[in-house]
Amino acid sequence: MTATLHRIPAAFGLLLASLLPVVTAAAADVFRYDQQGASAICQAALSAQAANLRARPLGLTNEGTETTFVTCTFQGDDTVGGRGATQIEANVSSSGTGATLINCTLVNGVASGASTGATYTTRSASAFPNEPGSSIAWLPADLPAAPPRISLPAIQCGLPPATTLHYLGRYYEENIGS
């Protein structure tokens, strides 16, 4: 009798499981945005220009009298799972006395020895004193051959005097499974 009683809960559990609807697992893509401060991920393109830059918590400012070039690379790996970015942006501003044009170039790709598999796409934004930062943005469609994603981005900006590169942003979709 005791052997039969132990089988009843197990049999009842199997019966309940067979009545539940079958749930299929589906992959889920989640929209994500990473923002990284320029002071953390950018540096002067030439050591002689480094003296003109002031790293502040809210940005990298050119305090010199000539344009200073800064190079920025993102932390993390956009190639994992083929994720890639759907948009890259740089946020810039001016603390000068008039509108200032700031040029930034998205470098997408890699260098391997003497060969370079990279594309260069330049964008500009006007920055105005005492105004919020202006965004310079790149989409995959802006790049040569319009890849589906921007996979290996880096940015170089020419910062005129009294301008600041605040942050870099990266938009992407990430597959988080089911």
Image (spheres, grey):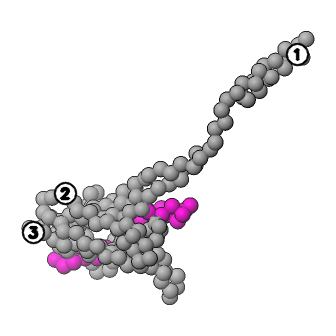
The residue at which mark 3 appears reads as 98
Q: Which residues are magenta?
A: 64-85
For the point 22% across and 60% down, which residue is it? 133
Q: Earlier in the sequence, mark 2 or mark 1?
A: 1
The residue at which mark 2 appears reads as 132
Whether residue 76 appears in magenta in the rendering, the answer is yes
Does residue 40 appear in the picture of this structure? Answer: no
The residue at which mark 1 appears reads as 4
Disc 2 is placed on an element classified as: loop
Going by the numbered disc 3, the residue's amino acid type is: Gly
Q: Residue furthest left?
A: 97
Q: Position of residue 77 (x, y in %)?
A: 50, 63
Q: Position of residue 118 (x, y in %)?
A: 45, 79
Going by the numbered disc 2, the residue's amino acid type is: Pro
For the point 80% across and 22% down, which residue is it? 11
Q: Is residue 63 left or right of residue 106?
A: left
Q: CA distance from mark 2 to mark 1?
A: 76 Å
Q: Residues within 10 Å of mark 3 (few under 14, many from 20)?
A: few
Going by the numbered disc 1, the residue's amino acid type is: Thr
Q: Is residue 104 left or right of residue 160?
A: right
Q: Residues within 10 Å of mark 2 (few under 14, many from 20)?
A: few
Q: Please give the count of numbered marks on the rendered protein.
A: 3
